[in-house]
Image: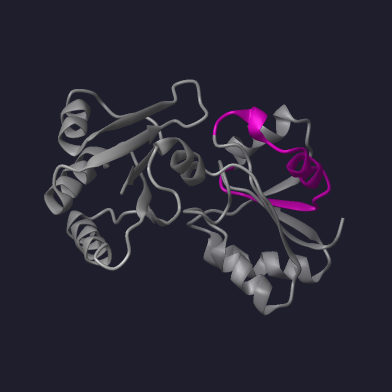
Amino acid sequence: MEKGLYIISTPIGNLGDITKRAIDTLKKLDILLVEDTRVSGKLLKNFDIEVKMVSFNEYSEKTKTASAISLLKEGKIVGIISDAGTPLISDPGFLLVREAVKNGIQITAIPGPTALIYALSVSGLPIDKFIFLGYLPKKEGKRINNLKNLKKTSEYITATVIFYESPYRLLPTLKNIYEVFGNIDIVVCRELTKMHEEVLRESTSKLIEHFSTITPKGEFTLLFH
C-alpha cells in the first residue's frame, strides 16, 4: 500500500455497510486517528483489526495535526476515521488534510457511508441540486440568521436543503424553521441504517407537535425543498 494519508469511511450504524477496501486499508495502517478510541475500538475488534489508535477529535485536532504531519513525512501510513460515516463531514480532519496538501503528502479517500446521501436518497425530495449545511449554530439568534440567509439564497437557486441536528436542539430548530419558512414540508430522518431507523415526512407544524410529546433520541438529519 502506498504511503500517505487515508480518509476512511465507516458505517453510520449497520456494520454490514463497511467495504472490503476499508477493512483491507485499516489492516495495513501504521497509525489510525480516531475521534473516540472506545467507539473505534469496538469497530476494529468486530473485524479483527489491530492497529495503533491515536485520539484525534474536535478538541485536539489543532494540537495534533502537526504531529500527524510529522509521522506522514517520516513515511508512516496514517488513516483517519470518525465515530461513524465519512470523516471531515461535520467531523474532524479538515485541518489535517489541508496541511497534508500543503506538504505534498499523498491523500487517498476510501469512500463509503454518509448520512446526508442516505437521507437524500430516501427523502423523496429533488436530488438534482442540494445544499448541505452541516450542523446549524447552537445559539438561536445565529441559527435564525442562517435560516433567513438561506431563504434569501432560495430566491436565486432552488435546491434541497440538508443538515444534521442533535436531539437536544431538534424541537427549537423546527420552531425556527417554522418562524422563517412557514409551515413547509420537512423530512426528518433518525438513526439511519440502525435498528430504530425512522423517516418522517410531515409539515413543520405536525413535526413540532410530534416532538413536543416525546423526548427525541438518536442522530437526526433534516431535509426540505
Residue 35 position in % (x across, y down): 56, 48
Viewer-side residue, 70 vs 129 = 129
The question of residue 163 being in magenta is answered with no
The relative height of residue 90 versus residue 214 in the rendered view (above or below) is below
Q: Which colouring convention does the figure follow?
A: one colour
What residue lies at 72% left-to-right and 30% top-to-bottom? 45
Q: For this rendering, which residue is in front, 36 or 149?
A: 149
Q: Is residue 106 above or below residue 192?
A: below
Q: Does the magenta stretch include residue 26?
A: yes
Expressed as whole percent of the image width and height from the top left, the position of residue 7 reads: 67, 55
Asked whether, in this view, residue 175 is left or right of residue 168, the answer is: left
Residue 177 lies, with reference to residue 209, above or below; the image says below
Look at 17% across and 29% down and name the residue there: 212
On screen, residue 81 versus residue 139, left or right, reads right
Residues in magenta, as a range: 13-36
> Which quarter of the picture shows residue 172?
top left
